């Protein structure tokens, strides 16, 4: 990369600008550390994208890589029903990635930060064999009791999901095997690819679910089957889900069929949808659905919580065994 680390940091700082007007962030980019005065409770999460593991540069534009890095981290805040506050970004720069390339990547981060009210408060730049983006996000709530964990599901609760499933996994297959697009119309194929490259964290939906009485929340990043198992384990309960009730994104079924895969398996085991799985009292569903609809997405009931442990997916034909989801260490 031509230019120095200080030159790059100066250009990044120029794009970010000063602290936001809300007064919470007092010192941002450009000093040894950020200074914030949050008040209330904070939720902190760390996420990372690594070239060759989470994306390939031959099919992922730099701006989309930046967007997705922040989106994945913000999705964790959505699952806590927290309001986005600050983000700290560590960028690993490999040989051949120029200064303008770094700025393009950072534009994807900054655009989503602007759209979600997230302040880019600092980070670091270092050499790396491949592109690495490690993002720490801080979310806020008036009180710790306002934050929702994955461990609060109770026997008798209804299980619900926002949005649709399988789009991101289908989009990934299209990026890796472009010929599969022949099975879809152009607009549908483009929408699936967009869900893979530029997911949108369900921040407003998470807060809406909290307001409607959600007892537990988790974001579905590693596949519905795997993330449901995490909720069941954390809550000490059993989850029973109707596999046929899980909403599948338009085109994902056709794409799966063209690839010789089971559409249900794609929806239940494919990751990176960044939707929310919620446990809430059954009597709260209509209120929750209306509140989530006001944020621009849907809420679908797909099962119930019971005493016991583990997760079961059932269908009219019997029990379904979906793929377990993405394992970061496999």
Image (spheres, helix red, strand yellow):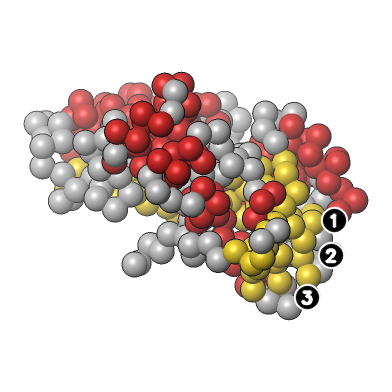
The quadrant of the rendering that contains the C terminus is bottom left
Residue 127 shown left or right of residue 238 in the figure = left
Q: Which residue is mark 3?
A: 307
Instruction: Sort mark 1 into few (<14), some (14-19) or many (20+) by Cα contacts within 10 Å.
Output: many
Q: Where is residue 92 shown, x and y percent of the image? A: 24, 46
Q: Where is residue 202 shown, x and y percent of the image? A: 60, 39
Which residue is rendered at x = 72% and y = 73% of the image?
237
Q: Is residue 59 visible?
A: yes
**Which residue is nearer to you in this view: 76 or 20?**
76
**Which residue is nearer to you in this view: 43 or 281?**
281
Q: Secondary structure at mark 2?
A: loop
Q: Earlier in the sequence, mark 1 or mark 2?
A: 2
Instruction: Sort mark 2 into few (<14), some (14-19) or many (20+) by Cα contacts within 10 Å.
Output: some
Which residue sits furthest front?
317
**Which residue is nearer to you in this view: 307 or 188?**
188
Q: Secondary structure at mark 3?
A: loop
Q: Which residue is mark 1?
A: 281
Q: Secondary structure at mark 1?
A: loop
The quadrant of the rendering that contains the N terminus is top left
Q: Which residue is mark 2?
A: 156
């Amino acid at each position: 990369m031509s230019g120095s680390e200080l030159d790059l940091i100066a250009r990044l700082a120029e794009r970010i600008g000063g602290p936001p007007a809300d007064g919470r962030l007092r010192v941002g980019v450009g000093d040894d550390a950020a200074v914030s005065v949050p008040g209330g409770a904070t939720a902190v999460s760390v996420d990372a994208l690594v070239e060759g593991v989470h994306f390939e540069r031959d099919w992922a534009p730099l701006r989309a890589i930046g967007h997705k890095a922040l989106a994945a981290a913000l999705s964790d805040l959505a699952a806590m029903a927290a309001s986005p506050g600050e983000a700290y970004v560590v960028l690993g720069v490999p040989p051949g990635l120029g200064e303008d390339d770094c700025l393009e990547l950072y534009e994807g981060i900054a655009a989503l930060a602007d759209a979600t009210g997230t302040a880019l408060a600092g980070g670091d730049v270092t050499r790396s064999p491949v592109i690495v983006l490690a993002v720490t996000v801080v979310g806020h709530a008036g009180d710790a009791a306002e934050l929702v964990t994955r461990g609060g599901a109770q026997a008798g609760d209804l299980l619900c999901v926002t949005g649709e499933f399988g789009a991101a996994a289908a989009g990934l297959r299209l990026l890796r095997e472009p010929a599969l697009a022949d099975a879809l119309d152009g607009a549908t194929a483009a929408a699936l690819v967009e869900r893979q490259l530029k997911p949108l964290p369900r921040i407003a939906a998470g807060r809406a679910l909290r307001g409607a009485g959600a007892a537990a929340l988790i974001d579905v990043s590693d596949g519905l089957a795997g993330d449901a198992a995490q909720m069941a384990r954390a809550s000490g309960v059993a989850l029973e889900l109707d596999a046929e009730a899980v909403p599948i994104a338009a085109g994902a079924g056709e794409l799966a069929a063209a690839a010789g895969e089971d559409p249900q398996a794609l929806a239940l085991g494919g990751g990176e949808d960044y939707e929310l799985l919620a446990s809430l009292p059954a009597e709260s569903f209509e209120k929750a659905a209306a509140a989530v609809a006001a944020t621009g997405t849907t809420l679908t009931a797909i099962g119930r919580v019971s005493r016991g442990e583990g997760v079961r997916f059932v269908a009219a034909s019997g029990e379904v065994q979906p793929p377990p989801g993405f394992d970061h260490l496999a």
